[in-house]
Amino acid sequence: MVPFIITFARVAQKMPGEFFNFAFGISVSQRAGLGLVCLTFCVCMCATRALGQGVLAPPPIDFSGIAPTARTTGTNQPGEMPPQAPPAPESPLLQLGPVQMRPHLLYRFLYGDGIQARPGDQVKTAINEIYPGIFLGLGSHWVLDYTPTLRYYSSDKFRDTLDHAVALNGASTYNRWNVGFSQSYTTSSQPLVETGSQTDQEMFLTALNATYQINSALSLELGASQDFNFVDQTVQGSALTDSRIWSTMDWLNYQFSPKLGAAIGVGFTYDNLSLGSDMISEQVQGRVIWRPGEKLSLTVSGGFEYRQVLDSDAPDLISPVFGLSAQYHVFEPTTLSIGASSVVNPSLYQNEVDETTTITASLHQRLLKRLFLDVSGGYTHISYRQTFSGFSISREDDGTFFNTRLSTTFLKRGTAAVFYQTSENTSSDSTFAFTSNQVGFELGYRF
């Protein structure tokens, strides 16, 4: 997971200054600190457990209130496109001293079939979504975004919902230290692949990250996160578990040249579960970051995780973990990206963990001056394993998705898009299998 975070942070530091002036209200000279903000937020999001992939085609993340994260970690919905920098306004809507206020609004219509209201019950429904939100730049070190989501279903088999996403991020430097902090709160009531039904979740994510530059080539990278997830226990026929997870992942980096760096990392996680046995795990990983030129960047990591189930006679689990992230700027308007990962996390179900392997690929193409095409696809394999004696495989899922999105800008700060997503999940438990086709459009504006 961490390689994706580092790659994003380095890319963020090289993004156009106009975007940072728009999004965060800071000058070009402060990009390095901002890159750490992005890094810390990604640590918070990527360090979390796999909370369950959503069935619905995701919204553009620059309007959803959720920070951009690697799509290959298994922690997010399939099909989400990489964020595109919105056009930079001349000034925020309102500024009070160091506080800059930038409201944003997105309306989204989606029609889809194969959306599960409960395991084995696939439903057609139209969905209207409204995302009103506000982004606050709090001086040069802090940013805050709050975005609620109002979601209305045409089918009476789903509940209309109000979700919330709040994120606070900060970063600073002191001598050789770069320090970042992130706190987010999210509620979600979407249909999930894992449960096969609409599932309420409440998530509190906290992350602290620090980097110390020992010398010109050697640096120490420290990261810690706390992830609380509370899930609705009323899903029909399911015993779901709340979780409290504390984890750390620390790296020793060595920069062989401006184009090549390597690191070795160790990590520890404690999983406290409301139902079932608690678990602890340790990780050892190696990482290589290679940037042979301005057009290509490659990050590869790999290692193993050793997981022990407490208060149970289940055998310990040794699993490979790996990550791959590559981005190639074929031409100025064309970007190709691929990613892959393998992670192990507690399941939403009692006495289970899931081993998730994900492969994704995406294309971003500017067709005309203000017309953009985004295409992505991927494959996910999830093995749900029991954490009590016997340790038999209780469920195997194989999922695929294909997402295409055509977008444009208008009136400098507005965006419009049409999208289509098809996804399929095959499972050893046929009640969790589905095929879904979804189509829709979006209209957004940043004030």
Image (spheres, rainbow, N blue to C red):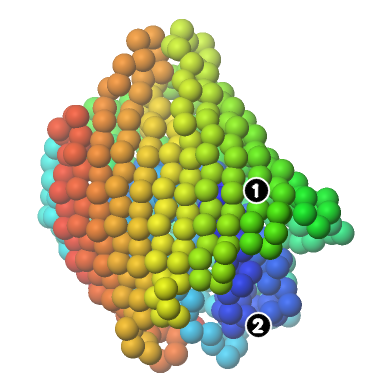
Depth check: give the residue in front, 376 or 387.
376
Residue 108 horizontal/vertical position (percent): 29, 70
Q: Residues within 10 Å of mark 2 (few under 14, many from 20)?
A: few
Quick check: 377 above or below 227?
Answer: below
Q: Residue at x 48, y 54 (%)?
A: 325
Q: Residues within 10 Å of mark 1 (few under 14, many from 20)?
A: some
Marks 1 and 2, how far apart in space? 43 Å
Report which quarter residue 28 is drawn in: bottom right
Question: Which of the numbered marks, if any, corresponds to residue 262?
Answer: 1
Question: Which of the numbered marks, if any, corresponds to residue 4?
Answer: none
* 68 lies left or right of 115: right
Quick check: 334 above or below 199?
Answer: below
Q: Which residue is mark 2?
A: 95
Q: Is residue 348 visible?
A: yes
Quick check: 36 above or below 196?
Answer: below
Q: Amino acid at mark 1?
A: Ala
Q: Amino acid at mark 2?
A: Gln
Q: Mark 2 or mark 1, which is nearer the start of the sequence? A: 2
Residue 115 horizontal/vertical position (percent): 18, 50
Residue 109 horizontal/vertical position (percent): 24, 69
Q: Residue at x 48, y 40 (%)?
A: 322
